[in-house]
Image: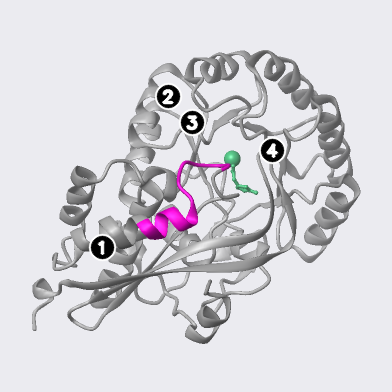
Amino acid sequence: YTMREARIERIETLIVDLPTIRPHHLSMAVMRNQTMVIVRLFCSDGIEGVGEATTIGGLSYGNEFPEGMKFTIDTYLAPLLTGKPATSINAVMAELEHQVQGNNFAKSAIETALLDAQGKRLGVPVSDLLGGAVTNTLPVLWTLASGDTDKDIQEARDLLANGRHHTFKLKIGRKDPSVDIAHVAAIKQAVGADVKVTVDVNQAWTESAAKQGIAKLQEAGVDLVEQPIVKTNFDGLARLTNYFRVPIMADEAVATVSDAFKLAKIGGGSVFALKISKAGGLTNTQRQAAIARGAGISLYGGTMLEGTIGTLASAHLFSTLSDLDWGTELFGPLLLTDDIVKKRITYANGGMELPQGPGLGIELDLNQVEKYKRK
Ligand code: MUC
Ligand code: MG
């Protein structure tokens, strides 16, 4: 046996449904559970890599959905990948790029599984395969989105008291802007000037509504405004970025590497929310980070509310970025009542710890997988 001979032997996918600890209200959906596609990639040297493809609210957030991602991987990606060298990750991903249009969430799960397997093979964490971590902990904010202002304030107070988080993101855009803005102002007032509060509109406003709304959010002391307008309006995002003092973050708009380039070129956003799913994998996300660095755009470690596997894949990548000015929102596993891995991520003091073990640094708990697997 030599490492070079390890081949992709078989790929298995399964859908897992996990309940959330409370309803999570976003402009486009209310989540009561989260659905994940788990990829198990078995190699000829006996090593297994795992990956995760997860979105938010079925088809309401992105153009991929859990049942479709499973079908895509089973029907198209797995046959393409079977027999390929498991250690040539760049070559395998280039082949996928060439043969499969779009389907970035599914591609990200495959690249994650390949990197996990390779890390296990070499006995190093995934971050080492990406040039090495610059930190062993990442800052993690919490999203207040219970749908009720008083409940959100109580949640914030509890989390500040136990120290788990000291930055909050609010989700708005479901209600009338005046109601949403009053909600934000009340929470900002309650947590105080020292606590950073960001707001995600998830594309809900027109550009003119955004011009009025952001002015009021700025007045209320909000620290950052995320994706206020429809993702396709790149020029509008540039106009808002130029117009306001409060930083504007691109999220849905900056999906692919080429989106990052086009937005950077016109100043669409002063911060980019990076997500391995949108970009089609960890390597593509590194490419977006390089574009942002060249353009002087700040970075933020985003989430698609993944479970532990997707969260750790993101965390390994984010840990290699020396300029993650806005921290991360890698709290996905904390929104779920249970997990499918043997040891959950440690969250404390406004951050998370990166596992030091090989690959992603986790092990699937097959009993738990069986319990939550869609039958
Ligand atoms: C988004 O648009 O950023 C991230 C945190 C959260 O609560 O929702 C996500 C999606
Ligand atoms: Mg967002």
Q: Is residue 62 magenta?
A: yes
Identify the residue position indicated by label 3 in the image.
Answer: 253
Per the model, the C-alpha gap separating discs 4 and 3 is 16 Å
Badge 4 crowding class, 10 Å Cα cut-off, few under 14, some 14 to 19, many 20 or more, is some
- Amino acid carrying label 1: it is Ala
* Residue 27: assigned label: 4
- Disc on the earlier residue, 4 or 3: 4
Q: Nearer the viewer, residue 226 or 7?
A: 7
Q: Compare marks 1 and 4 and give the one earlier in the sequence.
A: 4
Closer to the observer: label 3 or label 2? 3
Amino acid on which the number 3 mark rests in the picture: Ala
Q: Label 1, label 4: how many angstroms apart (C-alpha)?
A: 34 Å
Please tell me which of labels 1 and 2 falls first in the chain: 1
* Nearer mark to the viewer, of 1 and 2: 1
Q: Is residue 209 magenta?
A: no
Give how far across and how far down residue 38 sits, in percent.
Answer: 43, 67
- Cα distance between the residues tagged 1 and 3: 29 Å
Residue behind label 3 places its C-beta within 8 angstroms of ligand 2: no
Quarter location, residue 323: top left
Magenta extent:
60-71
Secondary structure beneath disc 1? helix
Label 3 element class: loop
Q: Amino acid at mark 2?
A: Leu
Q: For the residue labelled by badge 4, is the local secondary structure a helix, a strand or a loop? A: loop
Q: Is residue 342 visible?
A: no
Whole-angstrom CA distance, mark 4 to mark 2, is 23 Å
Give x and y (percent) for residue 327: 56, 48
